[in-house]
Image (spheres, rainbow, N blue to C red):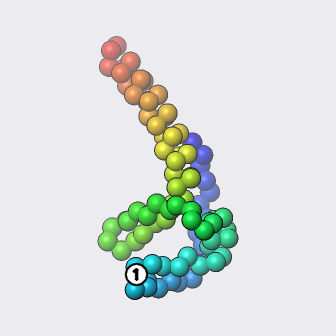
């Protein structure tokens, strides 16, 4: 699993429009290499925070996590049989 350095950046503000849409600031889109049509996963933290994840990155993370959990499951089962 890749570990990434935390890079906290402030990109500005956005406003929710009539249709519930928000614009991601250009600087953030450029740095994150977000392209038109790219899928983002939207997660909530508590009642006042939203986090956006690129789906491509989440798919890789989930795949790696699944492999590591399978290995961990095997270790747990072996330890119970001793």
Q: Provide residue 45's location: percent of width, then percent of height.
A: 37, 65
Residue 73 found in image quarter: top left
Q: Provide residue 54's location: percent of width, then percent of height.
A: 54, 59
The image shows residue 32, relative to residue 16, as above or below, that is above
Q: Provide residue 30's location: percent of width, then percent of height.
A: 67, 70
Determine the secondary structure under disc 1: loop
Direction from residue 59 to residue 31 in the image, left or right = right
Q: Provide residue 15's location: percent of width, then percent of height.
A: 47, 85
Residue 9 found in image quarter: bottom right
Nearest the camera: 70 or 5?
70
Image quarter hosting the N terminus? top right
Residue for point 55% across, 76% down: 24
The image shows residue 78, relative to residue 10, as above or below, that is above
Residue for point 51% across, 83% down: 14
Residue found farthest to the top: 82
Residue of label 1: 19
Image quarter hosting the C terminus? top left
Residue for point 62% across, 57% down: 5
Direction from residue 33 to residue 52 in the image, left or right = left
The image shows residue 47, relative to residue 58, as above or below, that is below
Residue 42 found in image quarter: bottom left
Residue for point 56% across, 52% down: 57
């Amino acid at each position: 699993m890749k570990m990434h350095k935390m890079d906290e950046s402030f990109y500005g503000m956005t406003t929710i429009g009539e249709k519930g849409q928000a614009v991601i600031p250009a600087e953030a889109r450029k740095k994150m290499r977000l392209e038109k049509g790219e899928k983002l996963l939207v997660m909530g933290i508590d009642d006042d925070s939203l986090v956006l994840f690129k789906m491509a990155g989440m798919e890789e993370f989930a795949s790696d996590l699944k492999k590591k959990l399978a290995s961990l499951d095997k270790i747990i089962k072996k330890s119970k049989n001793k």
